[in-house]
Amino acid sequence: MATKKYIIIPAALAAIIGLFLILENLEPPANTLLWEEIFNAGHTPLFGTLALVFLMLSLAVLGERIKDRRWHYVLALMLTAAAGIVSELAQILGPRDADPIDFARDLVGAIVFLGLHFTFDKKALAGFSRGFQNKLPRLRLLLAGLFVLAFVPVFLVAGAYFQRNYIFPNI
C-alpha cells in the first residue's frame, strides 16, 4: 500500500498542475459566441476531473485516518471549490474576465463527478440503508441531468447559429 501511495501522490499533483495549465493556456480556435460557450461549459468536466483527482489525493494521503470515507468526498469538494475561487480571482489579474457563473459551473462539475463516483463507491455506501441504495439509479440520473444542464447554453447558441443559417443562407 505504501508503494501505491508514492505513485498516486505525484501523479495526482501532476494531474492538478496539468488541469490548471489547460484552464490557463487553452485558447479557442475562433473568437465566436459558440466557442466561448463551449469553453465556458468546459469548466464543468475540467473541475469534475479536478475533484476526482482531489478525492484520489485525499484517499492516498489521509486514507484510514479519516474513518468515514464520505468525508474524503467533502474534502475533495471543498478543495475543488477553493481551486475554482482561486481560478476566478486569478482571472481578475489577467486578460480574462472573472465570472461567478464559471464558478457555479466548477461546482456543478465537482458535484456531478464526485456524486457519480460516490454512487459506485461500496466503501462509502456501506453505512447507508438498503432503501437509500435502491434510489442510487435515480440519483445517477439526476446527476447526469445536472451535467447536461451545464451544456444548455452551448445547445442554445448552436441552435441559434443553425436557425440563422437557415433563414439567411450563404449564397
Image (cartoon, grey):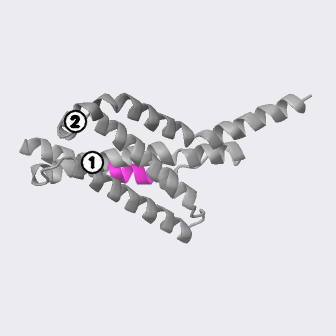
Looking at numbered disc 1 in the image, what kind of residue is underneath it? Leu
Which x, y percent locates residue 107?
A: 44, 52
Residue in view at x 70 percent, y 36 percent: 158
- Whether residue 169 can be seen here: no
The image shows a total of numbered marks equal to 2
Is residue 150 shown to the viewer in this render?
yes
Residue 68 placement (x, y as % from top left): 16, 49
Task: Report the residue that reaches farthest toward the left.
Answer: 2
Magenta residue check for 18: yes
Q: Mark 2 or mark 1: which comes first in sequence?
A: 1
- Residue that extends furthest to the right in the rendered view of this protein: 171
Q: Quadrant of the N terminus?
A: top left
**Residue span colored magenta:** 15-21
Q: Amino acid at mark 2?
A: Ser
The image's mark for residue 129 is 2
Element class at badge 1:
helix
Residue that carries the numbered disc 1 in the rendered image: 55
Q: Nearer the viewer, residue 159 or 32?
A: 159
Q: Nearer the viewer, residue 1 or 13?
A: 1
In the orientation shown, which residue stands out farthest toward the front? 131
Characterize the local packing of mark 2: few (<14), some (14-19) or many (20 or more) Cα atoms within 10 angstroms: few
Report the magenta stretch's main SS: helix
Cα–Cα span, label 2 and label 1:
24 Å
74 lies left or right of 169: left
Residue at image point 35% right, 48% down: 51
Whether the magenta-drawn stretch holds residue 47 is answered as no
